[in-house]
Image (cartoon, helix red, strand yellow):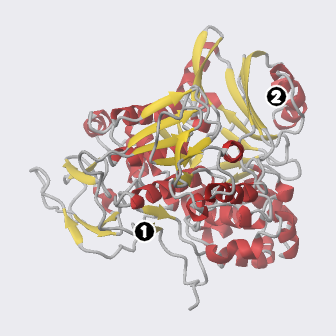
Amino acid sequence: MYPYLGGGPPQIILPVNPEGLPKLPYGMTRKVLVIGGGVSGLSAALELAERGFEVTIKEKQTSVGGRYSTHKLNALGEEFQLSTGFHGNNCWAIFFKLGEKVPQGEPLCLPDPPPTKDQRSKVKLGFHHGSVVCVNWKGSHNDSAICIHWKVSELFSILCPLDGFSQWISLLCLINGPVLRIIQHSVSIGWVPTVVQHAMFNLNSLTPVFTITNNFREYARIWVLRNTMCCWPDNHFAFRDYEWENVYSSGPWPLNLLAMIIRSPNLSLWTAIKTWRVSLGFILYNHGSLYETYDNLTYDEWADMYGVVPEFGDIWLKAGISASFDEVSSFSAAEFLLFSHFYFLSVAEAEHRDYSSVDSGTSLINPWVEKLKGLGVKFELGTAVTALGFDGSGKVTHDISDPSKLYDHVILAVDLGSAKQILSDSLEQLRERNSAVERALARIKNDLKYLDKAPPFKILKVWFDKQLERDRNHPILQTPQHSPINLIVQLHQVEQQYRDWVAKTGGSVMEFHLYCWSHGEVEDDKVWEIISPTVREIYPEIFDSNFKILASYVKSGDSCASFKNGTAQHRPRAIFPSKCGIPNLGLAGDWLRTDYPSALTERSVSTAIESVNQVLLAEGIQQVPLTVTTSFGPGFI
């Protein structure tokens, strides 16, 4: 059967055990060790703790959050909460498309709203595979409408009537849904009355209650409830060989692509005509055959094969790869096509970015940790797990450095380098040779040896005594042709703490993202010296106006995964250890592979849910539904 019939809405991977219990029975104890306190580890811990498991998180750093962790910096007489600097998380409308088509299913009727002077409405909601979409709405803009009251451990949200909302919320998807973006937008432009705004954002029941059930939408949920989320719909690019671009996607495929080409100062309709062969790879995207068809090719080889117009490739295609921390020259064509499908074709708004106006600790990690602690999750920070211990049956049971604490399940939610080291040392520490465990660890190790880390990166924050005044003073600017600089953020236009400092001093705070760092180990105070000639090309005003550096801070790292061509066949899935013979060990992280489109942080969370579901299945607890992007491109129909 021909599969390309227009892509389709997001898919729901349903539990394979719908008859399972909702949580562990009273008196039953199961202990789970989660190694790694990043986004994937926190996601796994929350799902398990909500279902009654005793969870311990061991993290080698002294703080949790991984790439979203924060720490304090005392500079210029003030205390700043520094995030690691990864701004602009993609809009997860990828999963929840607001459209005219209503999912089929039995309607769920809400109770009548409280009496109002114009009470003519009742809401019917269609329930389909875990998503809730409004199918019928009658009433005026002044009618009672709805507010969201998030409930933990439920497959969908409970809607509570609240006077004051407008009927434009009628098309609505409510598992971690885009209604959050709509509500936040309506507040920002004054569509929602002030009294309702206060009710939304100040109810005690709203702020701490959230659940990490459907991938990455919970980020938006927490940010909105704390009234800190902002949207960045435009993508600004600076090039050496082309005019600067302001790229944004609007409308369905292929109209969004045509509109972007028409708006471009560097491209033309003739470019669109010449890219028809390239478009086939996007239109006929099929995740099931993606890797066997394209992973043997690099992006450059694929571009040559399909005749990619150089300016089209430089401006749009390579620009996306440059943000992956990886080398463009060796980046897998399969991963490139996945990125394109995931962040552009699956829904027009996928190129939009969400960012928090406060640091990621305040907006995300701290309330997440508070919630976990409230569920009894134990944190052991500054504790590195060097190797795993096993029992006589071949199950992993403990951290070898702490053999007195035994666990029923272990989830290894760490970066690729740490996973390699832990599994390799576990193999070396085995007491019984020629065992099933040894063969299993050797098999995993053999696959992981083909996977590499991406080149190191640095993120430089600089406090200046002046501000840019030119027209191109964009909050976030991508610079794919200005290596080693990939991204420049005007932090005083993004985060409130820097905005407050700038208001007092008249200065500015800029952040330079330096991916694929190739200058070796250098002192932090030498980084600006290395990149300043490139900065001059982009922002000559900094040098022409003699900006003075008041303070600076450098964050360095090398924990990102590389996605070189030819490695997909060796990239394991989350439950690969169980396939090798270790039934109670799962993996989680963005370096893994999934059977559906996923990438970056969304993949970290999705693989965490997959490992959680392995635990739940083993213990007879109903699995977590997993909402994923459609596996097919838009097609011709």
Task: Work out whether residue 175 or residue 142 is closer to the camera in this orientation and state it.
Answer: 175
Q: Residues within 10 Å of mark 1 (few under 14, many from 20)?
A: few
Instruction: Name the N-terminal-most of marks 2 and 1.
Output: 1
Q: Residue at x 56, y 57 (%)?
A: 582
> Helix, strand, or loop for circle 1?
loop
Q: Residue at x 42, y 48 (%)?
A: 212
What x and y, as percent, mark residue 508?
A: 68, 23
What x and y, as percent, mark residue 151?
A: 28, 48
Inspect the image, locate mark 1, and give the three-letter code of the amino acid beneath it: Gly
Q: Which residue is mark 1?
A: 99
Q: Which residue is mark 2?
A: 541
Looking at the rendering, in which quadrant would you find the C terminus? bottom right
Q: Residue at x 40, y 69 (%)?
A: 16
Task: Work out whether residue 91 or residue 219 is closer to the camera in this orientation and state it.
Answer: 219
For residue 127, which quarter of the picture?
bottom left
Looking at the rendering, in which quadrant would you find the N terminus? bottom right
Q: Is residue 324 above or below residue 121?
A: above
Inspect the image, locate mark 2, and give the three-letter code of the amino acid beneath it: Glu
Q: Is residue 586 left or right of residue 514?
A: left
Q: Residues within 10 Å of mark 2 (few under 14, many from 20)?
A: some
Residue 629 visible to an observer of this rendering:
yes
Q: Is residue 427 left or right of residue 533?
A: left
Q: Is residue 25 above or below residue 38?
A: below
What x and y, as percent, mark residue 238?
A: 79, 46
Q: Residue at x 30, y 51 (%)?
A: 24
Report, in whole angstroms, how far the alpha carbon at label 2 lies from the one at label 1. 45 Å
